[in-house]
Each structure stands twice: as structure tokens, then as C-alpha cells.
Image (spheres, rainbow, N blue to C red):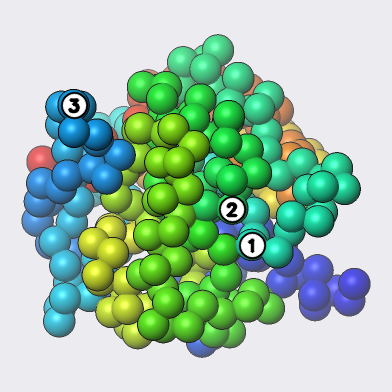
């Protein structure tokens, strides 16, 4: 693999970059819908006999564009949302069959042991490959599952070499992922969406509007993609977190092998500084308070 191709692969796994003119992953950009009020929304995961408080969402931006959330308001409480992208593209089944692990049960176990609330942005293909884990995560009140597309194909181009979803298929791709979560038995599913590669533009925000999701980006990149040094990942997160921050990490052993080790340092050090770990839904509610 050339150096340029490797760099692209790292940025894709980091969830970094934007459509049109890719930038460093610690500077998420792209067209954003204007922030709106937090409006009630019915969780697609709630069954007919389930009564739960609907997770907060943001109102559509100008011209009905899908709204984009990056962090809670500055100067708020010492809360931080750790998010984990469970990446698997639609065409990686052969690699999984050959033994490559796109899951990371050790990471989930550590989050449970440390009593950390978190949001997992999952692709539908990941849920199909690991339905027992998707159900376990999606029925644990400590976690919520958000949508990272079905296929992990790009919603804007260029996006580090990812295949691109046709505009007319974008909302359908997102709905297919939600269907995969529900088929696996996940219940704690929230109407949030993260663009593969972090790439989007106004056309993508417009095409995604029928799916009625709030797009979620980040303000802190962990740098865990392909990293081998857990301490380096931890330092990057610890240096970047501010009250209301939203951190992007990964739940994929083959692409982010040091994440679990980094979490074992990040969590106690942030707690020592007075931080509390919350899911994206709580962070979004804080933004509107």
C-alpha cells in the first residue's frame, strides 16, 4: 500500500475528513445545518409495549437540512461523551470469515467494569456479523446504539477512497442499518447518525432528511485508528477534552487495537479532574439547557 493510500485508510478509520476538501480529522467540517431547538423524538427502538423517554434531537436546519451536532455548549458542566464507531463495510464479509475481527468485546467489558456510559455508532453490517454483541450492547442501559450507516460507504465524495452511496439511496441505507439493529434485538437505539469518514455536504444533509436523524460529529479525535500505543491515544484525548466534549474512538480490534488500553487510563484521569461520562443523548440535552 502506498503512503498516500495508508494515510487515507487511517483517516477513514478515524472518522476524519470532510467532503470535497479533506482536512485533518481534528478539524471536522463540511456544510452544517444551523443548530435548532431540541425537539422530542420517538426512538425507533421502542416497541409497542415499551414506554421510554424519547432521546433529544435537533430541529432541521435551513431548507430542512439534517441538523449536525458536534458538542455541548461551551462553559457547561464537566461532562464528556465517549463514542465508539463499530465499523464494518458491506464488502468485508470475506475478511471476517478469514478471521479478521471487527468487534472488540474486551473494550465493551472494560467500559462496563469502569461503569462508563457511552454511545456506539454501529454499521448495519457490523450488527449482522455480530448480532449477539449488538443485542448485548443494545439492551444494556449503560449504552445506546446510534447509526453509522449500513454499508460504511461515503455520503459525499471524495472521501478517502470509500465507495459512494447514491443520493437517492442514502436514507434507505440508514433505514437498513436501523433494521439490522432491531433484527439483532437491540432496544436502546437512538435517532443519531454519523457519516462514514466524517464526509458530508449540503446534498447529503438534504438526502438524509427523510430518515429524520440528527447527524453527530465530534470535537476531539482520539487518534486510535491503527494506533499501537495506548498511552499516546490517551494523551491525545486527555489533552483535547473540555467540558461538553464529544470524543470519537473505535470499537474495531483490527483497526484500533490500542483503544481498550487507552480507556483504562482515560477514564480514571478524567474522573480525577471532575468529569462525568455521558451518552450523546445526555450531551445533546445539555446543549439545550
Asked if 262 appears above or below 223 in the picture, the reply is above
User: What is the crowding at mark 1: few (fewer than 14 residues within 10 Å), some, or many (at least 20)?
Assistant: some
Residue 193: image x %, image y %?
38, 56
**Distance (Cα) linking label 3 and label 1:** 33 Å
Q: Is residue 99 left or right of residue 220?
A: right
Q: Which residue is mark 1?
A: 90
> Residue 248, can we see it?
no
Q: Earlier in the sequence, mark 2 or mark 3?
A: 3
Between disc 2 and disc 3, the foreground one is 3
Q: Which residue is mark 3?
A: 49
Where disc 1 sits, the SS reads loop
Asked if 249 appears above or below 259 in the picture, the reply is below
Where disc 3 sits, the SS reads loop
Q: Which residue is mark 2?
A: 125
Asked if 42 appears above or below 176 in the picture, the reply is above
User: Residue shown at 42%/34% (left/top)?
Assistant: 186
Asked if the residue at tag 1 contacts the one at tag 2, i.e. Cβ–Cβ closer than 8 Å, the answer is yes
Amino acid at each position: 500500500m502506498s503512503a498516500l493510500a495508508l494515510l487515507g485508510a487511517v483517516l477513514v478509520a478515524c472518522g476524519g475528513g470532510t467532503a470535497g476538501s479533506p482536512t485533518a480529522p481534528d478539524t471536522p467540517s463540511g456544510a452544517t445545518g444551523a443548530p435548532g431547538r431540541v425537539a422530542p423524538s420517538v426512538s425507533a427502538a421502542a416497541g409497542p409495549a415499551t414506554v421510554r423517554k424519547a432521546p433529544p434531537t435537533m430541529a432541521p436546519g435551513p431548507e430542512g437540512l439534517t441538523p449536525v451536532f458536534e458538542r455541548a455548549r461551551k462553559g457547561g458542566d464537566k461532562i464528556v461523551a465517549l463514542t465508539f464507531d463499530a465499523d464494518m463495510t458491506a464488502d468485508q464479509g470475506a475478511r471476517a470469515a478469514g478471521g479478521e475481527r471487527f468487534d472488540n468485546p474486551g473494550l465493551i467489558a472494560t467500559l462496563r467494569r469502569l461503569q462508563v456510559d457511552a454511545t456506539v455508532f454501529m454499521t448495519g453490517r457490523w450488527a449482522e456479523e455480530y448480532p449477539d454483541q449488538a443485542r448485548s450492547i443494545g439492551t444494556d442501559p449503560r449504552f445506546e446504539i446510534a447509526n453509522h450507516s449500513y454499508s460504511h460507504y461515503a455520503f459525499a465524495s471524495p472521501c478517502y477512497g470509500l465507495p459512494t452511496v447514491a443520493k437517492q439511496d442514502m436514507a434507505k441505507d440508514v433505514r437498513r442499518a436501523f433494521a439490522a439493529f432491531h433484527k439483532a434485538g437491540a432496544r436502546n437505539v437512538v435517532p443519531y447518525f454519523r457519516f462514514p469518514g466524517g464526509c458530508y455536504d449540503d446534498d447529503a444533509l438534504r438526502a438524509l432528511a427523510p430518515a429524520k436523524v440528527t447527524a453527530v460529529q465530534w470535537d476531539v479525535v482520539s487518534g486510535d485508528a491503527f494506533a499501537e500505543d495506548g498511552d499516546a491515544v490517551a494523551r491525545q484525548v486527555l489533552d483535547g477534552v473540555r467540558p461538553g466534549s464529544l470524543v470519537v474512538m473505535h470499537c474495531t480490534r483490527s483497526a484500533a487495537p490500542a483503544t481498550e488500553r487507552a480507556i483504562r487510563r482515560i477514564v480514571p484521569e478524567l474522573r480525577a479532574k471532575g468529569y462525568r461520562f455521558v451518552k450523546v443523548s445526555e450531551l445533546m440535552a445539555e446543549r439545550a439547557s
